[in-house]
Amino acid sequence: MPVSPAQAFALVNGGNFASCLTLPREQTLQIFCTDEYRTGKGKVNEEAEVAWRFMGTTRIVACTAAVLADKACGAEDKKKLNGALAATSLINAGFFAANDTMKRDVKPAMRALNIATNLGVGAYALKEALGK
């Protein structure tokens, strides 16, 4: 059985957001962010710590919901779900590609990985949404 767009979305995004939820913020900053950001305005503080955890929690719920919806949807609703996943993934890729903060503060390799994987999932989900 091939991987569905919802499963691909969850796989691509779930690891990122699980790290937001479970790893110490300093460790995730070392993985994802430039040294300049990590030691400057990205320094760990209570507000950033809480926001980081909430982001992880809400995105894990989104990934889980997408996979569950994928299993429960009929053909027409699955096209709509795939359209929403395509839009979300393509918007995510756009943010990583064009946003000044992403360009400046995210490590180039992590930024490129996020752009590539989101473009891939977005294209696959769009193909499935259009029934091609």
Image (tube, helix red, strand yellow):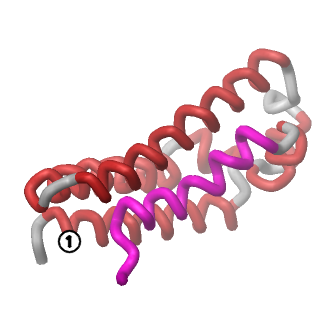
Q: Is residue 95 left or right of residue 128?
A: right
Q: Residue at (47%, 47%) from the top-left corner?
A: 64
Question: Where is the C terminus found, in terms of image quarters?
Answer: bottom left
Magenta span dominant secondary structure: helix
Which quarter of the picture shows residue 49? top right
- Mark 1 belongs to which amino acid? Lys
Q: Is residue 96 left or right of residue 16?
A: left
Which quarter of the picture shows residue 55? top right
Tell me residue 67's x, y (percent).
40, 55
Could you tell me how many numbered marks the image carries? 1
Which quarter of the picture shows residue 20? top right
Magenta region includes residue 10? yes
Compared to residue 129, the image places residue 32 above or below, namely above
Magenta region includes residue 83? no
Q: Residue at (38%, 51%) from the top-left corner?
A: 68
Compared to residue 44, the image places residue 61 above or below, namely below
Most foreground residue, 72 or 50: 72
Q: Residue furthest bottom?
A: 1
Q: Residue at (37%, 60%) from the top-left corner?
A: 6
Most foreground residue, 56 or 102: 56
Tell me residue 89's x, y (percent).
39, 54
Tell me residue 117's x, y (percent).
49, 67
Q: Residue at (36%, 81%) from the top-left corner?
A: 2
Q: Helix or strand or loop: what does disc 1 sit on?
A: helix
Q: Residue furthest front?
A: 72
Tell me residue 37's x, y (percent).
80, 39
Q: Residues within 10 Å of mark 1 (few under 14, many from 20)?
A: some
Q: Which residues are magenta?
A: 1-22
Q: Is residue 29 left or right of residue 114?
A: right
* Residue assigned mark 1: 127
Question: Where is the N terminus found, in terms of image quarters?
Answer: bottom left
